[in-house]
Image (spheres, helix red, strand yellow):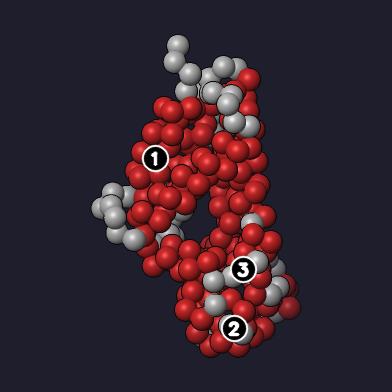
Amino acid sequence: MSEEARNSPRPPAAQGRRERKAQETRDRIFREAIALFAERGFETVTIEQITDRADVGKGTFFNYFQNKEAVLTYFGGIQLERLQQSMDAGEVEGTPREQVRRVLEILASYPEMTPELARALFMSALNFNRFREIGGQPIWHIEGVLGKIISEGQETGVFRTRSSGDEVAVFTLGLYFLALLTWCTGFTDKPLVEVACCYADLALEGLAIEP
């Protein structure tokens, strides 16, 4: 192969395959790490154990994650990125009520979510006493998005104003986690998106001011 051919840009198909493979590797490391955190607790799990479980080299781990803590922020970061992309595309619009419902629908439609992954995420958070410090940043960003929408609804007379927008936003985001918990523990046979939207509707009816 000529030097020119080696240095020429790869065709889009090759780039797409490379990106898909990288994403698959990142997701595998994430899933296996979360499973280990759930089983043994965050503090006791080593990077070597994660790479052994994921069947990758230690260098590969550091290609995707700076440290163990970065694994905990990965899922929240992906959710925040998905939400931001939807907002940029104009998919979160309408009345404040419709926007809140849409945010929860987007979070619940994460395509790679399984009951097993959801249970491991919950267990990992519960087994790590610094989860709020390490893994909470993306969650607070999402809470901020909801808080802005809810405050707008309160200012325009759509939502009740008894509680602050931030407090209501935390409660509303909690509906997503409640739906996730209900779904992953088998208390419902409905799809996660349907459960989250149902809980959102119940809460929004309580927040609404009757005309």
Residue bearing the label numbered 2: 44
List x then y, in percent, for residue 105: 45, 42
| On-image quarter of the C terminus | top left
User: In the rendered view, does 177 fall on the left or right side of 114?
Assistant: right
Residue bearing the label numbered 3: 129
- Seen at 68% across and 75% down, the residue is 67
Residue 5 in view (yes/no)? no
Label 2: which secondary element = helix
Badge 3, how many Cα within 10 Å: few under 14, some, many 20+?
A: few
Among numbered discs 2 and 3, the one appearing first in the sequence = 2
Count of marks overlaid on the render: 3
Q: Quadrant of residue 16?
A: bottom right
Residue farthest toward the top in the current orientation of the protein = 211
Q: Amino acid at mark 3?
A: Asn
Badge 2, how many Cα within 10 Å: few under 14, some, many 20+?
A: few
List x then y, in percent, for residue 192: 37, 50
Q: Is residue 34 above or below residue 172?
A: below
Badge 1, how many Cα within 10 Å: few under 14, some, many 20+?
A: some
Q: Amino acid at mark 1?
A: Tyr
Spatial separation of the CA atoms under disc 2 and disc 3: 13 Å
Spatial separation of the CA atoms under disc 2 and disc 1: 36 Å
Q: Is residue 12 above or below residue 149?
A: below
The answer to whether mark 2 and mark 3 are in CB contact below 8 A is no
As drawn, the label of residue 16 is none
- Seen at 63% across and 20% down, the residue is 155
Residue bearing the label numbered 1: 199
List x then y, in percent, for residue 133: 69, 61
Residue farthest toward the left in the current orientation of the protein = 189
